[in-house]
Image (spheres, grey):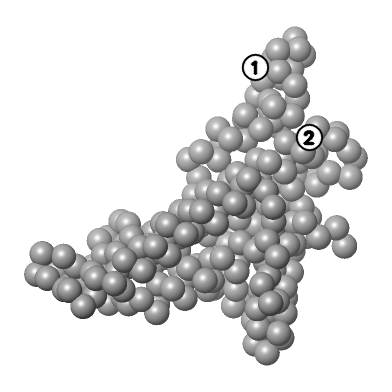
Amino acid sequence: MAVPRPQTRQFEAFMTNLSYARRMVEAGRMLTPFKSPTIDIDDFYRAAWVQAVAAIDHWLHEEVLRRVAELAAKDSPDMPYQLRVYELPLHRVEAVRRGDVPLPDAVVEHLRDKLAAQSLQHPGKISEVLKLVTEKKVWYEAAGWINGSFFQGRTSLNEKKLRSRYLEITQRRNKIAHDADLIDGDLEQRRPIDEAEVTDAIDWIERIALGIAHVLDDEG
C-alpha cells in the first residue's frame, strides 16, 4: 500500500526534484551496456546523489518558511517557544509598525535571509531549525513512523540510526560535490558507486522527508 504524502506545493516540488534524481539513475542504467572511454556512467549516479540531497535540503527550507508564516499569522500563545522569542532587526520592526509589511511577512523575509546561506544537511541543524515550527522530537518520532510505515515494525530503526543514515548520505554528497568523490589521499581514483547504492540513498531521502512531514502534520 502506498504511503500517503502531503498535498502541498512544497512537497510536490520535492517529489519533482527527487524524480530528476531517479531519472539520472535510469539514464545511467540504460547507458551501462554502451560504456565508452569518453563517458563515465558513474557520474550519472553521482549527479543523482547530489540532486537528491538538494531536493530534501530545498524542501526543508521551504517547509519551515511556510509553517512559520502560518504560525506567525495566528499569533497564538501556543506557538513553539523558539518562534515566540524569535528576534527581528529594528528596520523590520519599524516596517511592521508603519504598516508597510504584515508581521508574518516580516518574520518570513528575515528568516529566509538567515536560511539562505545555510544548508540543512546535518541532523542537528535540521532539529534546530524545526524548533521554530514544532516542539516535538522530530527525529525520534520520524524514526518510529518510518519503521511502522515502510518496514511494518520489522527493523530496529531508531533516532540514532536514522540520523546516522541521513548523515552518511549527506557526507557522501559532500565528497562528490567538494572533493570530486576522490578517495582520500588520491588525486585520480574515485570512490565506487552503483545503481543500487544511489537508489537506496534516494529512497531513504524520500522516507526521511515523509517521516518529518508526518511528524509536523500530526496534531497528536
Query: N-terminal of the two: label 1 or label 2?
Result: 2
What residue is rendered at 88% in x and 38% in y? 76
Residue 145 picture quarter: bottom right
Residue 35's spot in the image, x, y percent?
A: 16, 73
Query: Image point 75% across, 25% down: which residue?
Result: 103
Depth order, front residue of 17/118: 17
Amino acid type indicated by mark 1: His
- The relative height of residue 62 versus residue 217 in the rendered view (above or below) is above
Q: CA distance from mark 1 to mark 2?
A: 18 Å
Query: Regarding mark 1 in the picture, which secondary structure is present there?
Result: helix
Residue at the far left: name it. 37
Residue 156 position, x and y percent, is 65, 86
Percent x, y for residue 208?
60, 66
The label on residue 91 is 1
Find the residue positioned furthest to the top. 98
Q: Residue at x 75, y 56 (%)?
A: 216
Q: Nearer the viewer, mark 1 or mark 2?
A: 2
Seen in the picture, residue 181 relative to 144 is either above or below; the reply is above
Whether residue 165 can be seen here: yes
Question: Measured from the top left, where is residue 153 in percent x and y?
Answer: 71, 86
Label 1: how many Cα within 10 Å (few below 14, some 14–19, many 20+):
few
For the residues bearing labels 1 and 2, Cβ distance under 8 angstroms: no
Q: Which residue is denoted by mark 2 in the rendering?
A: 72
Q: How crowded is the residue under tag 2: few (<14 C-alpha within 10 Å), some, or many (20+)?
A: many
41 and 70: which one is in front?
41
Which quadrant of the figure has residue 160? Answer: bottom right
Q: Is residue 50 left or right of residue 137?
A: left
Q: Is residue 117 above or below residue 131?
A: above
